[in-house]
Image (cartoon, grey):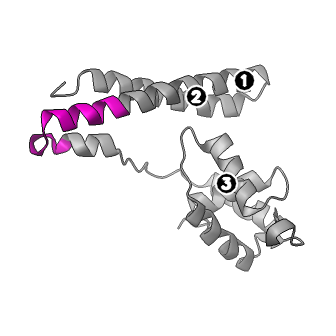
Amino acid sequence: MADSGVNATAAALLGLLHDGPMTGGQLMAAAQRRLGPYWSMTRSQVYRELPALADAGYVKLGKPGARSSQPYAITPAGKRAFARWLSEPAGRESLRNPVALRVAFGAQQSSAQLQDVYAQAQEYHTAALTEAREMAKEAKKSGDDFFSASLEFAVGYHKAALTWLKSAPGK
């Protein structure tokens, strides 16, 4: 945890709540839509962080809605914690690529297994690149330069992954 006492997942939730109150499910959808091309968040992470944020006074619970869903709203203390988190160094990236991990153990796999790994990765990165490009184009068109810039990172990442896949051993 950083000096602000807020980890990256909690900070992402606080950032999303600047747009207004949301339930856990709505936060998941917003995270996927806004952050998904370059940042992953699981449902269990969201539902683990929300009570901790409430206990810290960074969010407050609204009135229960349909199917007992509860909206969360960011508090002034939550906005201050988010601002502190933004002012801290970003920290070191955590890179975990399941394809690179499998390639590291390529000698223990059959050629067919490795080809399957490459084909699935190529399919995924091609689709993700197309989606990130389209999202970046729409964000740029709407004038959201910051969102567009974050999506350009995803575009570059998927392009790099596809370039790497072309030269991967055992192809």
Q: Which residues are magenta?
A: 104-120
Secondary element at image label 1: helix
Residue at (64%, 53%) from the top-left corner? 87
Tell me what residue is drawn at x 55 percent, y 23 percent: 130
Q: Residue at x 87, y 70 (%)?
A: 62
Q: Which residue is mark 1?
A: 138
Which is nearer the eye, 60 or 77? 60
The residue that label 3 is drawn on is 28
Q: Where 73 falls versus 116 (above or below)?
A: below
Give x and y (percent) for residue 150. 60, 34
Q: Is residue 166 left or right of residue 29?
A: left
Q: Secondary structure at mark 2?
A: helix
Task: Find out whether the residues at labels 1 and 3 contact each other: C-beta distance under 8 Å.
Answer: no
Q: Amino acid at mark 3?
A: Met
> Mark 2 = which residue?
132
Q: Is residue 113 highlighted in magenta?
A: yes
Q: Quadrant of residue 53?
A: bottom right
Q: Amino acid at mark 1?
A: Glu
Between residues 20 and 165, which one lies in front from this camera angle? 165
